């Protein structure tokens, strides 16, 4: 199957769903609790991080230009205690208002080999929030998977944006085709690793009779696949075969 192609409404709908889940989790946990999936971070660190990302995106995306931003906000003096959650909520609400009012075709810088349009950031913020919602729930030992269609699009984002932008966690040269299968989303991806580079093959042009010379296969739920790529869980949660060392070349985070 071809990769999921989202829309502004799809991504903002996900952001609207994931934000309250994030807040509920961080409100339940003591703010000095460790976040197991983010070593050395506490819950308040997670709140500060996600809120700061929202601030930066708000200041950058609405400029209507494709030039990279030159100044990043001074995030010193961020509130602690319960005020941190109030601050996060304010930034989340402001981000939603901004993205909801933007034409997704409006010019906007991004760091990926993608069209320089505002729609990139609706997608990026949906996935940023979903993964950190999962992190926050890890802190209270009550995690829910990422919704299957959203997770499938998140896998595509890793493969069409993060990795081509050189944001690979283990940038060792690797060669061969990796086949990823999201068993609950009717989605699959073929990734050709070429040294330090990679190419996401277009499954719309791949025939069943094609010999892809696949060297590794990983199959599981879309959520588990996504969380593996984000280095949140180990590949052992998936059904894997072949040269599984190639999977490390797909990790981000």
Image (spheres, helix red, strand yellow):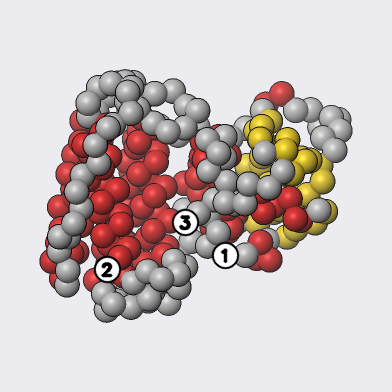
The residue pinned by badge 3 equals 146
Residue 144 x %, y %: 45, 65
The residue pinned by badge 1 equals 233
The residue pinned by badge 2 equals 44
Q: CA distance from mark 1 to mark 2?
A: 22 Å
Asked if the residue under mark 3 is in contact with the one under mark 1, i.e. CB atoms within 8 Å, the reply is no
Left or right of residue 223: residue 84: left
Q: Between tags 3 and 2, which lies in front?
A: 2
Q: CA distance from mark 3 to mark 2?
A: 22 Å
Q: Secondary structure at mark 1?
A: loop
Q: Between tags 1 and 3, which lies in front?
A: 1
The residue located at (42%, 33%) in the rendering is 111
Q: CA distance from mark 1 to mark 3?
A: 13 Å
The quarter of the displayed image where residue 62 is located: top left
Mark 3 vs 2, N-terminal side: 2
The quarter of the displayed image where residue 21 is located: bottom left
Residue 1 x %, y %: 66, 35
Q: Nearer the viewer, residue 188 or 85?
A: 85
Residue 191 x %, y %: 69, 38
The mark found on residue 41 in the picture is none
């Amino acid at each position: 199957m071809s990769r999921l192609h989202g829309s502004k409404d799809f991504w903002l709908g996900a952001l609207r769903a994931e934000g309250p889940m994030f807040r509920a989790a961080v409100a339940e946990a003591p703010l000095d609790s460790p976040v197991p999936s983010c070593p050395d971070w506490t819950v308040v660190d997670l709140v500060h991080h996600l809120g700061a990302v929202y601030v930066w995106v708000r200041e950058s995306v609405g400029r209507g230009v494709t030039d990279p931003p030159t100044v990043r906000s001074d995030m010193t003096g961020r509130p602690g205690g319960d005020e941190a959650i109030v601050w996060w909520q304010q930034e989340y609400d402001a981000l939603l208002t901004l993205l909801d009012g933007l034409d997704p075709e409006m010019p906007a810088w991004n760091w990926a080999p993608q069209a320089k349009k505002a729609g990139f950031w609706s997608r990026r913020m949906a996935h940023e929030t979903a993964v950190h919602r999962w992190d926050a729930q890890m802190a209270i030992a009550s995690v829910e998977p990422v919704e299957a269609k959203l997770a499938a699009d998140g896998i595509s984002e890793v493969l069409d944006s993060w990795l081509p932008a050189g944001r690979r966690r283990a940038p060792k040269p690797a060669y061969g085709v990796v086949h990823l299968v999201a068993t609950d989303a009717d989605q699959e991806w073929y990734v050709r690793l070429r040294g330090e580079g990679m190419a996401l093959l277009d499954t719309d042009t791949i025939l069943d009779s094609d010999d892809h010379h696949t060297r590794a296969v990983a199959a599981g739920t879309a959520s588990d696949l996504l969380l593996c790529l984000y280095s949140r869980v180990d590949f052992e949660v998936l059904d894997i075969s072949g040269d599984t060392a190639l999977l490390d070349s797909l990790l981000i985070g």
